[in-house]
């Protein structure tokens, strides 16, 4: 290793990836997630703060090129709050890669009415255009099964019993056949719900990379007809640093009255407890007092039924690297959003 100062921030090499993962605060900051994004053509920079050659802080930055330009936008999802020294290094890296700004969305819960980064004279502001949801439901997995069931909404417990009565079987199945069924149900679900979905290559590379790293696990909920299983739901959950996450879920339009997804959630809760997870992050929700007309309202109510706590994060922030182009970018962003809104009303 080359000579370094006692305290330094530098690019992290692969021989430190295990330590990197122990310090990473979320699967989107994991080494495997960075490798997956690389396979999708995204440039990844991993920075580490070392004290006496001991790695004590990590940040994984992805760089996204703006079409028809040489400029990029940096993105740091779900990190901890970077130290002031790390922020200064990010500015250096941002200039090197011609970033207009770097968006930070820390995996840090809001514990007061407002939050500002505690660093004076750094060009960081609240982002006008967040990417990740500001809220999620988080379920404490430490209570026993009886207590977990007791804390659920009565309708949720009832729906779990319906699926059990119909002998729906939930199991971890990481086979190629199960993944192909997951893909089929994913595109069926997004078409039915009219939601955006990543393409097939995205899901394939994500699954290949994160399952190999033992982060991603695939579960299916099967209903048996004449002793032949039909998959009614397929989910991918992440298990990372003693937290379980629910990032990807899909379901069939058939036999929805059997409530397979309700049992799926319950069985993944039990899986998390078995694996030693202390909490279940349900990967996003609406905020307090959600609008019943919101297209995500059904998912919000579904997650809420399990007795999880609604968490608010500190939000989204932009570390401005190029002030002039940052202003131009936001003007263009607003004009584009207005155009798409008008277009959707016309069509």
Image: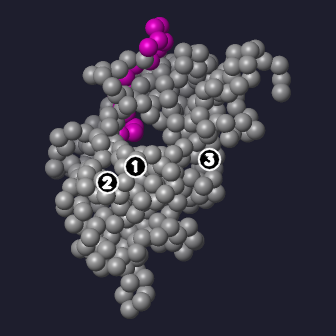
Mark 3, secondary structure of its residue = helix
Query: Which residue corresponds to the image point at 43% horizontal and 82% vertical from the top-left?
Result: 229
> Of residues 274 and 244, which is closer to you in this image?
274
Query: Which residue corresponds to the image point at 34% horizontal and 28% vertical from the top-left?
Result: 110
Visible in this render: residue 269? Answer: yes
* In the image, residue 128 lies in the stretch drawn in magenta: yes
The residue furthest right is 2
> Of residues 281 and 149, which is closer to you in this image?
149
Q: Earlier in the sequence, mark 2 or mark 1?
A: 1
The residue furthest top is 121
> Of residues 261 and 326, which is closer to you in this image?
261
Asked whether the beta carbons under mark 2 and mark 1 sit within 8 Å of each other, the answer is: yes
Tag shown at residue 171: none
Q: Residue 43's spot in the image, x, y percent?
A: 62, 38
- Say above or below: 215 vs 63: below
* Residue occupied by mark 2: 148
Visible in this render: residue 105? Answer: no
* Residue occupied by mark 3: 32
Query: Which residue corresponds to the image point at 56% horizontal and 58% vertical from the top-left?
Result: 207
Q: Residue 103's spot in the image, x, y percent?
A: 47, 29
User: Quarter of the image containing the N terminus?
Assistant: top right
Task: Give the CA separation, mark 3 to mark 2.
Answer: 32 Å
Picture quadrant of residue 146: bottom left
Task: Give the CA separation, mark 2 to mark 1.
Answer: 8 Å
Question: Which residue range is magenta in the image?
Answer: 118-133
User: Quarter of the image containing the C terminus?
Assistant: bottom left
* Residue occupied by mark 1: 141
The crowding category of the residue bearing disc 1, from other C-alpha atoms within 10 Å (few below 14, some 14 to 19, many at least 20), is many
Please identify the dominant SS of the magenta region.
loop
In the displayed structure, does residue 219 sit left or right of residue 146? right
Picture quadrant of residue 201: bottom right
């Amino acid at each position: 290793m080359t000579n370094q100062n006692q305290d330094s921030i530098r690019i992290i090499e692969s021989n430190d990836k295990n330590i990197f993962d122990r310090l990473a605060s979320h699967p989107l900051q994991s080494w495997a997630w960075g490798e997956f994004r690389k396979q999708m053509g995204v440039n990844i920079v991993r920075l580490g703060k070392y004290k006496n050659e001991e790695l004590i802080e990590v940040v994984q930055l992805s760089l996204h090129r703006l079409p028809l330009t040489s400029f990029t936008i940096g993105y740091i999802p779900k990190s901890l709050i970077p130290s002031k020294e790390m922020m200064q290094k990010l500015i250096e890296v941002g200039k090197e890669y011609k970033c207009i700004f770097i968006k930070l969305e820390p995996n840090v819960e809001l514990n007061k009415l407002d939050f500002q980064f505690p660093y004076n004279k750094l060009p960081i502001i609240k982002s006008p255009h967040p990417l990740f949801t500001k809220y999620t439901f988080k379920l404490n997995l430490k209570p026993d099964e009886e207590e977990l069931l007791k804390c659920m909404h009565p309708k949720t417990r009832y729906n779990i019993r319906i699926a059990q009565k119909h002998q729906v079987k939930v199991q971890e199945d990481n086979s190629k056949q199960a993944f192909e069924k997951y893909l089929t149900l994913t595109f069926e679900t997004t078409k039915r719900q009219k939601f955006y979905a990543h393409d097939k290559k995205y899901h394939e590379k994500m699954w290949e990379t994160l399952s190999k790293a033992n982060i991603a696990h695939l579960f299916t909920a099967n209903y048996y007809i004449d002793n032949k299983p039909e998959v009614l739901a397929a989910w991918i959950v992440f298990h990372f640093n003693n937290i379980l996450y629910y990032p990807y879920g899909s379901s069939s339009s058939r036999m929805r009255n059997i409530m397979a997804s309700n049992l799926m959630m319950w069985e993944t809760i039990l899986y998390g407890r078995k694996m030693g997870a202390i909490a279940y992050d349900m990967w996003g929700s609406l905020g307090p007092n959600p609008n019943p007309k919101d297209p995500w309202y059904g998912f919000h109510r579904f997650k809420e039924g399990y007795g999880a706590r609604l968490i608010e994060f500190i939000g989204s922030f932009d570390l401005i690297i190029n002030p002039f182009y940052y202003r131009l970018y936001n003007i263009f962003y607003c004009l584009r959003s207005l155009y798409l809104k008008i277009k959707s009303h016309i069509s």
